[in-house]
Image (spheres, rainbow, N blue to C red):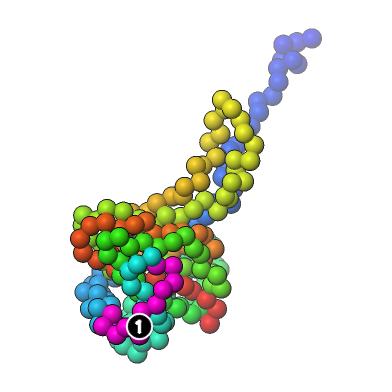
Amino acid sequence: MSASATTAPPIKVGVKPLFSTWIYLCENGPIHLNDRLEELAHRLMQDDRNATRRTNAGGWHYAFDLFKLDEPLVAEFRNQMEQHVRAFLNHFRPPERKKQDSFKLEGWINVNRAGHSNVLHCHPGCFLSATYYVKVPANMKGGEIVFRDPRGPAVAMYETPGIELPWVGNGTGLPFNPATGHLILFPSWLEHRVERFEGEGERISIAFNATNP
């Protein structure tokens, strides 16, 4: 028998991730609107009826839909955010299928100061959620938005002493350090929280959901 007859053919293998969770991060959002958005937040905060408690542990949470305010500033900001939502949706489509999707935005303002945070939560009843950072103090400690691994404990259900499994996380979540002008879009089912903020000044953000029109 010849040597060539016993030689095994080369084996082709591949390793690829499945079921990735996509996050949209823009580091240069509409910063030209920030000063006016901050002024709007402070104006709304003067009326106690505009405050509510949702996921915020301390801090100020606007009680109503920001995008229902009949103000040119809000309309301009909404237009900017709609463009980002459409860009995120079209990113996954081939050129011939890109389109101008129809949807509705519902938003609110968050103002956190020292000691404030947001508990773990998700946003039911919508398909995309987002946070735009109007103002983040330069020397802020904490205040990160943390996304929890949606697989939960499933990836660690089988123990392997002495064998390190690269796909098993520690379950604590992935933090994003915000900065002024950053915009993050993510699937609404993805659980997240905001870490306790320490430092001087205010951490002002505008969050919103995209829903059917």
Q: Which residue is drawn at 74% across and 15% down?
A: 6
Percent from the top left, x then y, of residue 80?
36, 75
In the image, residue 71 lies in the stretch drawn in magenta? no
Q: Which residue is drawn at 21% across and 54% down?
A: 139
Number of other residues with Cα within 10 Å of mark 1, as a class: few under 14, some 14 to 19, many 20 or more: few
Answer with left or right where residue 199 lies relative to residue 176: left
- The image shows residue 187, relative to residue 154, as above or below, that is below
Percent from the top left, x then y, of residue 95?
51, 65
Amino acid at the residue labelled 1: Asn
Magenta residues, as a range? 44-56
- The image shows residue 118, relative to residue 1, as above or below, that is below
Q: Which residue is drawn at 44% across and 61% down?
A: 119
- Residue indicated by mark 1: 50
Answer with left or right where residue 166 lies relative to residue 177: right
Answer with left or right where residue 33 lies relative to residue 24: left
Residues 132 and 147: in front is 147
